[in-house]
Image (spheres, rainbow, N blue to C red):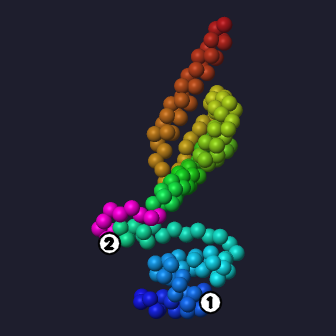
Amino acid sequence: MDKLKLVDKLREKANVSYEEAKIALENSDWDILDALLYLEKNGKVKKPSVNIFYTNEARYGDKDKKSGKNEENKYETSNNFQGIFEAICKYIDTCNNIFLEIKKKERMFLKIPLTVVIILSFFAFWMVIPLMVVLLFFDIELYIYSKKVNTDKVNKILRKISDNVKVIKEKFKKADKNG
């Protein structure tokens, strides 16, 4: 899009004069979104009542690919922070879709997301860990369930733990009968 069309488009969107639109675009390297932000900072355009943040990963990544140079990206620090934040959000979302099921035979007592289990384990580990061990002695089984993540290995380990607890219970029963 040529510069005159960009100025006209910004004038239309922001309801500002030709001069203000041109100055804003020049100060923002002819990027219409940055020009709108520039106008907001200078009080020429009213800010939206709700703050919404959108990312456009392709915008900055394409410039590096087109230029063929390994230039330092002027947005690198914010992208690193943004990348860490997105990774944390991705892990939290994944954990929200993995559930710990507490069952006895086929009756389910509780189904909670792994995120809750992690938070409870972090803040109340002195309650959560012994509670899980006690549950095993009452023939209550723990399962991990997820549609997206393969939980077979974890469930196999939990099943082995449950079986070992049953063996220990049987040994206590035999020792009690003999003693």
Q: CA distance from mark 1 to mark 2?
A: 34 Å
Type of amino acid at the residue the image marks with label 2? Lys
Question: Looking at this view, is 3 or 81 the one in front?
Answer: 3
Q: Give residue 18's quadrant in the image.
A: bottom right
Residue 99 in picture, x, y percent from top left: 59, 47
Magenta residues?
65-75
Looking at the image, which residue is at 45% across and 67% down? 57
User: Is any atom of residue 170 visible in this view?
Assistant: yes
Which residue in the structure is indicated by mark 2? Answer: 66
Q: Residue at point 39% right, 61% down?
A: 72
The dot on residue 145 is none
Q: Where does the image place residue 102, in percent across and percent down from the top left?
A: 63, 41
Packing grade of label 1 (10 A; few <14, some 14-19, many >=20) is some
Contact, mark 1 vs mark 2 (Cβ under 8 Å): no
| Relative horizontal placement of residue 86, taking residue 179 as reference (left or right) | left
Q: Position of residue 6 (x, y in %)?
A: 48, 88
Identified by mark 1, the residue type is Asn
Along the polypeptide, which appears first: circle 1 or circle 2? Answer: 1
Position of the C terminus, as image quadrant, is: top right
* 33 over 153 or under it: above or below: below
